[in-house]
Amino acid sequence: MSSQGGRMSFPAVGSYSAGKFALEGWSEALAGEVAPFGVRVLIVEPSRLRTAFNAAGVLRTAQRSADYDASTGAVRANMAEADGVQEGDLARAARVIRDVLDAPDAPLRLPLGAEAVRNLTRVYRRALDDVEKWASVSESADFPGMPPAVRAF
C-alpha cells in the first residue's frame, strides 16, 4: 500500500512522502525481479480512505512553528479536519483491489479513488510537459555524437 503521496508531495508531508516514494521505487524494481517467476506486484496509490489515519492522537506532526504557517498551516489543518469525512470507502477499495489483482492485465500502479486519479493525472502531465520542454537542454549534457544508452527494461 502506497499513497498518492508516493508519486507527489507537498509542504508538511515530506517525511511521509519520502517513505512512500522509497516503497514505490523498491516495488517497481521488485516487479521486474519476480516477473520471471509469474509473480506480479501491485502498488496501490489511494486517495484518503476513511480510516483513523487522520484521527487525533494517531496523526503525528512536528511542533507547530509560526514561521511555517504560510507553507504548511493549511495542510496541517486539512489533515486534522479530514478525520471521519474521507471520501474513500474501505470496503469498496478492498473490492477494487481484489478485482484488479485478478485481472490478467493488472497495472503496476493503481491510483485508487477520484482524488488520486485527478491528482496523479495532473502530476504526470506536468512532469511529462517538463521533460518535453527541457529535453534539448537535458540532452546537451551528453558528449557530442554519442548515441543514447539503451537499456532493456
Image (cartoon, rainbow, N blue to C red):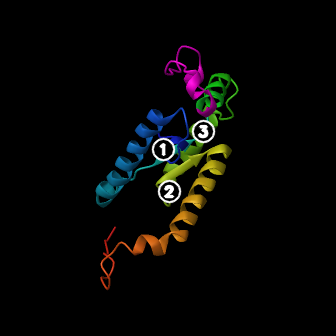
Q: Label 1 belongs to which residue?
A: 6
Between the C-alphas of marks 2 and 1, the distance is: 19 Å
Amino acid type at image mark 2: Ala
Which circle marks residue 93 in the picture? 3
Taking the spot 47% from the left edge, 40% from the top edge, the residue there is 2
Q: Quadrant of the C terminus?
A: bottom left
Callout 1 crowding tier (Cα within 10 Å): few <14, some 14–19, many ≥20: many
Taking the spot 50% from the left edge, 69% from the top edge, the residue there is 134
Of helix, strand and loop, which one carries label 3? Answer: helix
Between the C-alphas of marks 2 and 3, the distance is: 15 Å
Of the pair 74 and 35, the residue shown nearer to us: 74
- Which range is magenta? 49-71
Q: Is residue 2 left or right of residue 49?
A: left
Q: Label 2 belongs to which residue?
A: 106
Q: Predominant secondary structure in magenta?
A: loop
Instruction: Choose top left, top right, bottom left or bottom right for residue 123.
Output: bottom right
Taking the spot 52% from the left edge, 41% from the top edge, the residue there is 5
Q: Is residue 19 magenta?
A: no
Which circle marks residue 134 in the picture? none
Confirm or deny contact between disc 2 and disc 1 (CB under 8 A): no
Amino acid type at image mark 1: Gly
Of the pair 109 and 144, the residue shown nearer to us: 144
